[in-house]
Image: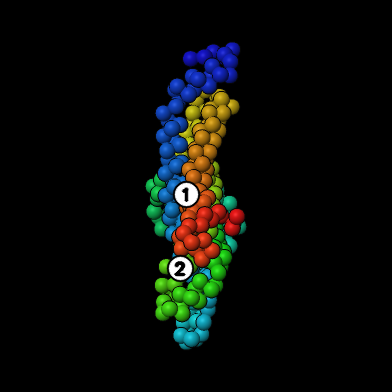
Amino acid sequence: MPTAESGFFEWVFFLLKKFGPLLLRGAGVTLLISLTGTIAGFVIGLAVGYVRAKPLQKENGAGGYWARKIVRGVLGAYIEIFRSTPMIVQAMVIFYGISAVFHVTLPYLLAGFVIVSINTGAYLAEIVRGGIQSVDPGQQEAALAIGMTYGQSMLHVVLPQAIRNILPALGNEFVVNIKDTSVLNVISVTELFFVSKSAAGTYFKYFEVFFITSIIYFVMTFTVTRILRWIEKKMDGPENYVMHGSQTVPDVELVTKGGE
C-alpha cells in the first residue's frame, strides 16, 4: 500500500489494482442500464411519437375524436414533465414514491432500468415525431393511393425512413444515458459512479479514483460513438454506385452521391 508521501500515479496504479474489477463491474451495470433503457425508451418513444404524429380526424365520430385528443393530451403532459425535470429528481420520486404508495420496494437494478426507460421515452417521443414529419408527405400519399391503410403506410413506408433520419439522435441519446446513469447512485444502484464513490471513500483518494472513473467513462462513450458512426456510414451505403440501364449511356453510368 502506498504511503502518504507516495505520488499520484503510484496511488492510481494501487487503486486500479485493488478496485479495478469492482469498477469494471460497475461499468458493466452502467452499460446494461443505459443500453436496455435506451432500447425500451425507443419503443416507448416510437409508440408515443406515432400517436402524436397521427392527425386528429372526426370521421369516426365525436367520441373517438375526443378520446384520441385526451390520450394525446396525457402523452403531451408525460413528455413535458419528464423533459422539464432532472433525472435525479425523477429517480427519487419514482423509487420512493412507489415504495410509499404501493408499499413495494423495487430491486435497484430494475428501478434504474424503469427510470432511464421512461426518461428516454419522453425525449425520443419528440424525436420520433419530428422524424415522421420530416418524411415527404407524398410518400404516404402514394402508399394510400395504392390501397394501403394508414397503419400499413406508416409501418412499411414512413417509419423506416423516419428511423433512419433519427438514428444520429438515437445514438446520441444512448451516449447521454451512459453518463446520466450516474444519478442513479442516489437510489443505491451499483453503477460506475456509485462504485467509484465507495472506492474513493476507502482511502479518501477521491481525485485518484475519479481520474480512473473519468477514463472509463471516456472509453465507453468514445467506443460507442465510433460504433454508431460506423453503423450510420454503413446505412448510408457506398459513396459511388452503378446505375444500370441509364437513358444517357448505352450500358452503365457511374453515379456519385450528391449528383456529382
Which residue is labeled 2 in the image?
157
- Looking at the rendered structure, the number of numbered marks drawn on it comes to 2
Read off the residue under disc 1: 234
Seen at 53% across and 56% down, the residue is 255
Q: Vertically, is 9 above or below 79?
A: above
Of residues 207 and 238, the one drawn nearer to the viewer in this rendering: 238
The quarter of the rendered structure image containing the C terminus is bottom right
| 51 up-or-down from 14: above or below | below
Q: Which amino acid is tagged 2?
A: Val
Colour setting: rainbow
Answer whether residue 122 is visible to the viewer in this image: no
Using the numbered discs, state the Cα–Cα distance from disc 1 to disc 2 in whole angstroms. 20 Å
Residue 43 locus on image (x, y percent): 44, 59
> Tag 1's secondary structure?
helix
Which residue sits at x=46%, y=63%? 245
Residue 109 at what x, y percent from top left? 41, 45
Q: In front: mark 1 or mark 2?
A: 1
Q: Amino acid at mark 1?
A: Lys
SS at mark 2 in the image: helix
First reached walking from the N terminus: tag 1 or tag 2: 2
Circle 1 packing at 10 Å, graded few (<14), some (14-19), many (20+), is few
Graded by Cα atoms within 10 Å as few (under 14), some (14 to 19) or many (20 or more), the crowding at tag 2 reads some
Residue 238 image point, x, y percent: 49, 50
Residues at marks 1 and 2 touching, judged by CB atoms closer than 8 Å: no
Q: Nearer the viewer, residue 143 or 193?
A: 143
On the question of residue 14 being in view, the answer is yes
**Residue 34, numbered label:** none
Where is residue 25 drawn, in percent x and y?
Answer: 41, 34
